[in-house]
Structure formats: C-alpha cells, structure tokens
C-alpha cells in the first residue's frame, strides 16, 4: 500500500517542485502531441511561453485567491494542480496545470486531486470553477464524473483552438 500525501505549496522548495512537475508535463505533452495540430509561438504550450508562465507560478497562484496543490506518493512529488480567481468574475475560480507524472499514475490521484481542490476552493470562498483542456486528452469522463458540465467557449477563445479544446464548469455549492 502506497503512502499518498498532499500539501499546499508555501515555500520556495514547494514552488520548485511544482515548476519541475510542470516542465515534466510539458515534456510529456510534446512527446504525445498530434502531428496535425498547430505549432508555433501562438500555441499555448509553446516552450518559451510556457516557461515564462512556470517562472511566475508563485505569483500567478498566490494565496489567498489562488493555490498550488502538490501530491506525493511514498514521499515523491508526482502531481500538482493550480487555481486562481478567474479574470473579471468574482467567485469564479479557474484551474489549470493538473498533472500526474507517469510514475504517479495508477493511484487514483486525478480524482483525489479534484476532491481536495474542491474543498480548498470552497474554503477560499469560491462558488463556481471552470477550465479548458485539449480534447485529445482523455480526462473528460473523469471531469464529468466529478460534476463538471460542458460550456461554450468564452468570448475571445482563439478560433483555431475551438475544435481542439473543450471548456467545462462546476458549481462548488
């Protein structure tokens, strides 16, 4: 039986762990990226653009309105998820960068990460949350089982990504 633990990132060491996990995710992303999908600087996962975001994680997801949650299995950090208040809409959180490393899979961490994040979001005063994800990733069923529903792409969502991404939301009340 594995020992699974969770913590909210609070110090430089935790933020470095989250940054390492994000870079690991980016590496996984590009190894599995469809050859017929857009590439280039306008791609949200462009390595230079992504690295700039990774460097800003501690401030992008700063407490009390945001958070970075790190999961470990047997003392080894293997997953993370991040959230913050959505722009221009009080009470709405946006989550992103949910990742479980290949070595951490098979422990049900995706579901556990969502449940823990829901509790934390409620404690932080949020009543609704949303996210977007590439439709080539196979996690939509997990999100639906966790109470998320499909919603239309928001105004300003890039046209070239509309057929490649879905957006979902969930109430926290």
Image (cartoon, rainbow, N blue to C red):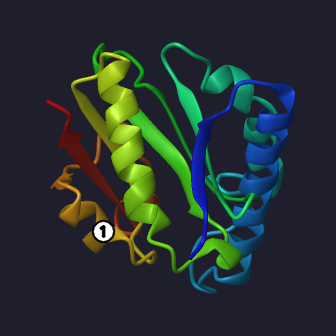
Observer-nearest residue: 113 or 25? 113
Picture coordinates of residue 82, whole percent (x, y): 55, 39
User: Residue at label 1?
Assistant: 142
Residue at x-position 20% and y-position 43%: 170
Residue at x-position 72% and y-position 26%: 58
Q: Quadrant of residue 68?
A: top right
Picture coordinates of residue 142, whole percent (x, y): 30, 68
Observer-nearest residue: 158 or 170? 170
Q: How many marks?
A: 1
Residue at x-position 36% and y-position 15%: 88
Residue 49 visible in the displayed image: no
Picture coordinates of residue 45, whole percent (x, y): 67, 57
Residue 62 visible in the displayed image: yes
Residue at x-position 20% and y-position 63%: 144
Residue occupying the far bottom of the picture: 35
- In the picture, the quarter occupied by the C terminus is top left
Mark 1 crowdedness (10 Å alpha carbons): few <14, some 14-19, many ≥20: few
- In the picture, the quarter occupied by the N terminus is bottom right
Horizontally, is 157 left or right of 90 in the view?
right
Observer-nearest residue: 143 or 78? 78
Can you say whether 38 is above or below 51 in the image?
below
Q: Quadrant of residue 73?
A: bottom right
Picture coordinates of residue 102, whole percent (x, y): 67, 78
Can you say whether 125 is above or below 147 in the image?
above
Can you say whether 91 is above or below 165 in the image?
above
């Amino acid at each position: 039986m594995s020992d699974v633990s969770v913590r909210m990132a609070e110090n430089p060491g935790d933020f470095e762990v989250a940054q390492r996990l994000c870079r690991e995710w980016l590496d996984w992303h590009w190894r599995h990226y469809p050859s017929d999908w857009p590439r280039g600087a306008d791609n949200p996962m462009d390595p230079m653009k992504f690295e700039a975001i990774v460097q800003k994680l501690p401030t992008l997801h700063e407490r009390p309105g945001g958070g970075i949650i790190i999961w470990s299995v047997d003392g080894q950090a293997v997953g993370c998820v991040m959230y913050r208040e959505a722009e221009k809409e009080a009470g709405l959180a946006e989550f992103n960068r949910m990742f479980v490393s290949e070595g951490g899979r098979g422990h049900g961490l995706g579901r556990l990460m969502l449940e823990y994040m829901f509790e934390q979001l409620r404690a932080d005063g949020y009543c609704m949350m949303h996210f977007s994800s590439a439709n080539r990733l196979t996690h939509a069923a997990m999100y639906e089982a966790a109470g998320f529903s499909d919603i239309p792409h928001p105004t300003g969502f890039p046209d070239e990504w509309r057929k490649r991404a879905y957006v979902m939301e969930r109430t926290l009340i």
